[in-house]
Amino acid sequence: MKKLLQTAAIGVAYAVASVGAQANVHANQVADFYKGKDIELRIGYKPGGGYDNYARLLARHIGKHIPGNPNVIPKNMPGAGSVKLTNYLWEGAPQDGTVIGAISRGAPFEPLLGNSKAKFSADQFTWLGSANNEVSICATVKRTGIKSWTDLKSQTVTTGGNGSGSDTDQFPKLLNAVLGTKFKVVGPYGGGSDIVKGMIAGELDARCGWSWSSIKSKNKELLASGDLVLLMQMSTEKHPDLPNVPLVMDLTKDKESLQILNLMFARQGLGRPYVAPPGVPAKRAKALQDAFMKTMSDPEFLAEAKKGGVNLSPISGERVAELVAAAYKTPKAVIARTIDAIR
Amino acid sequence: MEVSLLDVAFSALGVLMDPERLFYLGFGTLIGLALGIMPGVGGVAGLALLLPFTFNLDAYSAFAFMLGLGAVTSTSDTIPAVLFGVPGTSASQATVLDGHSMAKNGEAGRALSAAYAASLIGGLWGAFLLGLTIPVLRPILMAINSPELLAFSIFGISMVSALSGSMPLRGLTMAGLGILLSMVGGDPTTGQDRWTLDTLYLLDDLPLLPVALGLFALPEICDVAARRTAISETSKHNLKDGMVAGLKDVLENWWLVAKCGSLGAMIGAIPGLGSAVVDWIAYGYAAKTCKGAEKTFGKGDVRGVIAPESANNAKEGGSLVPTIAFGVPGSASMALLLGGFMIHGLEPGKSMVTTNLEVTYAMVWSIALANILGAGLCFAFSGQFAKIATLRYTLVIPGVICIMMVGAYQASADWGDLATLLIFGSVGWVMKHLRWPRPPLILGFVLGGIIEDYMRISYQLYEWSWMLKPICFVMLSLAAISLFQPLFKKIFFKKDGAQLLKFSPAVFKNVDFFPIAVITLLLWTLWQTFSWDFESQGAPQVIVLVTLACVVTTFVLTIFNRPVNQTVNDEDGVLDLAVDLGKIGRAAYNIRVLEFFGWLVGFIAVWAFGGILLSAIAFVIGYMRFRGRESWKATLIYMMAITGLIYFVFDQGFHITWPVTVLGTYFPILHDVIPTM
């Protein structure tokens, strides 16, 4: 019996060791490939915005977590709200793991929602992860007298939009169609902050499509003054900061409505997504995905993020892939209704 | 209250006087000057790159660095504008008209020194206005909403009349075309593709830089290449006299500086306007109000340099206003500055004018000090820079072209940028030589998009009653006067006004191809709109029809008004650079221009084949050796300098996303080894 145990122990130890060694060989192959190489982190926007900021922060830290420690160089490739970059990653970029991308949270769903310029199928990308769950807020100011989201069904409210295809334009329209709210979208405003200024100055009543993380970092004053009334949060799950603000998914029981809301708001969960082209060799893809998650708990990275007011609630590449795949399984009729609603 | 405010203002200066903070201010200023000289590389790219370095600085140093960098790009951008006719940033486009004319007349030193002095005083004045209005910023901005911003923008576009010289209809035609250009891309409300030719490139708005470089810079370079002489053959002053003359000019025109400085600060405070049009509006204002301007502007009048230069430095102070007060960035570089706010735990809004007032005043001082330092440095070297204008053309053109190509490409890292540059380059050259005014096109292009957006917002909120809001009413009335006065003057009050209605038999000339081409283009754009969804058709169709009416009218008036035995008097009265063919005949001259265009197309072809470094090497060697017979030694040194600049600054520094090349695609190993391939 003792001998048997010994043999078993040796066997287990051997098995563990060989798995370890194999893993080592994998890591070595990947390290050999990346050693001395550059990885391009392409950013689908011009310098200066949120996506650019997150991506440059990631680029400064992820290299040390990838076997072989390649240089990670951020490069801007703006165009069509990052659809240009996503097209490039789909067809054109090398698929060897030397090019990765920072695209918008909405881009993966563009082909579903009828954008004929988006020539990719996002469920086939190599997803590396997302840095933040961007719960989006619908808010108004005290002056309007609106106290809860149910008031939106009886009172017409002007809300600022940033133009066709933007969250601030699509979200209120979708809510009108699904929940029966009476938003009147006014726009196109140049940026989100222009809308907020309009609310403060009395030109607008509401902004619907406003990252909670952005409110926290840029509009502390407004939030603290008590002038801001948070009407609902839009994502598939509640934000831990906001247990008392109703979640859009809880506001209807209708099955098809819920499917529409899910199709539209699943993107919030993958708020700051990173992606590699389809067909990246499995070991390198795994190494990049692991490096992404390791970076998200790297103390130096966290310190810099905190300093820059960058919010983090990362999810893995696997989880992003699941969210995207689920959206791609939405029934055609639901997709058609969604497209109709946001037009 | 007054005293305590002053106290804070001066204690902020004390805070900034720390050696380390001054060091960062100086460092930022130097980088800003360097970025301003290179066309296409503005402060925004530099700021994005350097932002991480400011993370570990204290707030005062960080803002000193960032504001120093942003404040002086519009000081040094004058250098290429005056010397080569190539605006260093979009804020010095208007400086080209008179600044470059002065350089051609041998007055480069005077133009540069006047520009720096105007920049300095304008910048300080802008900072002073900002410092003065800080306590009342928020209340003022609360009263300025979308309808008011719309009215300001409409007033801006009414400057078209001042920028069209004595040809209001040609100016309006061009402004209309500019507005139509601004509409290319997705309709902001309906998402309808407008004239995108089914490309992703045109789906986003056309970038300003390749358009501006094409319209103004390329034609100047083409003409230098065709004349095959130095930019300036003569030198009117010796170094010192020229610089003193420039200084004197500014002091004599101090009232113009103050007015244009205030104008610049105001325009800077309007989000979306800023550097793209501030110079044109100031130039237009000066052209309208300065005595005798219609005869001298565009031909080397120093006031045409002073006006835009004092305005474009003042705008930086202005653009801080909405940024500080509401977190609405007044410009792209201000958006980056906002990132800096967060890093240092500051929040735009009330606190910036109360608890954090000292930081705000330190920002004002940073702008002021950077302007002094920037103008001082430029001034010290302006004599040396002025000598560049007397260099042989084969020594000037290769460098300017290489940097301009990269600069234009940088706008959106797309071949489309280079196509835009070349297309607008040819159009700009034709316009310059046929005397169709170019500034209205740019003004319409920049303001068109803003007006469209604010118009939609204002109409949705107030329908037409927005026009009756007090500020709007005043601005719109001013705009109407500014726009229509010259038109009426021309029709009713001109001495030979009666001639306009006297028709002689139609006479056609070769130059008529241009209006005919414009008419054809407009008809095509109109035809395209019919396939759009109904809501998206209205506004573009109105603009097309109005533009069409303008161009057809001016065309008809021209052909029926040509005295058969006289030369066409289309040549006079346009606010633009004079055309100088040198001693060459028109036909030979045009062939030379075509040849140079061939060089440019070749440049891009080699780039597509093997990368920018290869094309830069080929162009420098080709142009200097085979066009210019420069020595091998000079050619090689020049080549190393240019390729070094492209490699170290643009490739390694800015990490520009280079396009895919033929060689790099078929021989991936080359792509890995050779940069930019």
Image (cartoon, coloured by chain):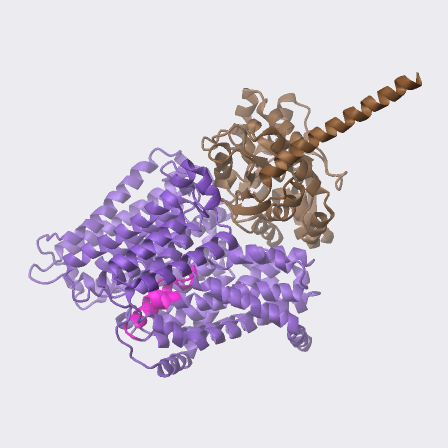
Position of the N terminus of chain A, as image quadrant, is top right
Above-or-below relation of B382 to B162: below
B600 on left or right of B497 = right
Q: Position of residue B45 (x, y in %)?
A: 51, 55
Residue B297 visible to the viewer: no
Residue farthest toward the left in the current orientation of the protein? B565
Residue shown at the point (61%, 32%) measured from the top left: A285
Residue A34 visible to the viewer: yes
Main secondary structure type of the part rendered in magenta: helix
Depth check, front residue: B514 or A5: A5
Residue farthest toward the right in the current orientation of the protein? A2
Which chain's colour is purple? B
A4 on left or right of A63 = right
Which chain's colour is brown? A
Depth check, front residue: B489 or B307: B307
Q: Where, by quadrant of the figure, is residue A243 drawn?
A: top right
Q: Does A261 appear in magenta?
A: no
Q: Position of residue B380 (x, y in %)?
A: 45, 77
Above-or-below relation of A283 to B675: above
Above-or-below relation of B10 to B585: below
Magenta residues, start to end: B80-106
Q: Where, by quadrant of the figure, is residue B222 drawn?
A: bottom left
Q: Position of residue B185 (x, y in %)?
A: 41, 42
Q: Position of residue B577 (x, y in %)?
A: 28, 65
Q: Where, by quadrant of the figure, is residue A64 drawn?
A: top right
B428 on left or right of A42 = left
The number of numbered discs placed on residues in the rendered structure image is 0
Residue shown at the point (66%, 34%) measured from the top left: A27
Depth check, front residue: B136 or B643: B643
